[in-house]
Amino acid sequence: VKRALGPSDRLYPMPSPLVVAGTLESADTLAVAWIGIASATPPSVAMALRGTRHTLEHIRKQGDFTVNVPSTSLAPLVDYCGLVSGRDHDKFAETGLTLAASSAVTSPMIEECPYNMECRVTHEIEIGQYVLVIGEVVETHAEEAILDESGTRVDIEALDPLVYIAGLREYRALGRRVADAFSVGKTVVPKE
Ligand SMILES: Cc1cc2nc3c(=O)[nH]c(=O)nc-3n(C[C@H](O)[C@H](O)[C@H](O)COP(=O)(O)O)c2cc1C
């Protein structure tokens, strides 16, 4: 039996990267759970930012941003960046998170986050009090320690990405492996 829960912004689970925009000298960052891939060609991300976010001002000024995926050990620092605003805090000085130069965009990356995406803004769409910012991913970086033996793929266990659970307002780690994607479906025998 299903119970209707009404209109909701909850989807389970959500990622919780830190998005950075600005320059090496002056940047801001915030935690963003409402983010996902919007296209493969060209590779693009879409994220929903409340119009009042200070980081959004940097994104608009710079025309680019980075998406920085934290490991679970960074949960306290990610949460801090989601609790205070860059309007009255220097989140990098206060958390000790370090900025590193990107290679294709002006907005810097966070050194301590092992996986990073450099994005150039392509679209902005207003949705109520939110702005859907879409950016083309022009470069990605991974710490060598989180790459598998091929040297080109991220080892998800090593990345140990921070997961956010809406509603519960909890951070979690990934659970167990279930099956091979684009493969296990082939074991399904279509019903007549
Ligand atoms: C786990 C988590 C996820 C969040 N996700 C979003 C989000 O998707 N969009 C958004 O606008 N704010 C989100 N926030 C809130 C911002 O991170 C928060 O308001 C931040 O202080 C804004 O900083 P800024 O004003 O320096 O940009 C989230 C906060 C947390 C803790």
Image: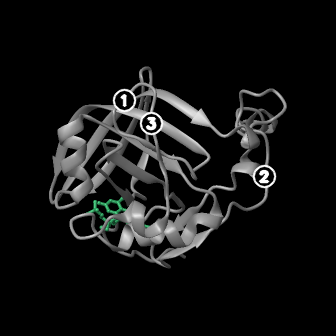
Q: In which quarter of the image is residue 123?
A: top left
Check disc 1 and give the amino acid type. Val
Secondary structure beneath dot 1 equals: loop
Q: Quadrant of residue 186?
A: top right
Q: In this view, does 106 lie above or below 56?
A: above
Q: Which residue is drawn at 75% across and 50% down?
A: 158
In the rendered image, residue 175, in percent from the top left (x then y), is placed at 73, 62
Mark 3 Cα within 10 Å, few/some/many (few <14, many 20+)? some
Instruction: Write down the residue under mark 1.
Output: 105
Viewer-side residue, 141 vs 7: 141
In the rendered image, residue 177, in percent from the top left (x then y), is placed at 79, 53
Dot 1 and dot 2 residues touching (CB under 8 Å): no
Does the beta carbon of the residue at mark 3 sit less than 8 Å from ligand 1? no
Viewer-side residue, 190 vs 44: 44
Of badges 1 and 3, nearer the viewer stands 3
Mark 1 Cα within 10 Å, few/some/many (few <14, many 20+)? many
The label shown at residue 118 is none
User: Of label 1 and label 2, which has the lower sequence position?
Assistant: 1
Q: How far apart are marks 1 and 3 (CA)?
A: 9 Å
Instruction: Write down the residue under mark 3.
Output: 101
Q: In this view, does 123 lie above or below 3?
A: above
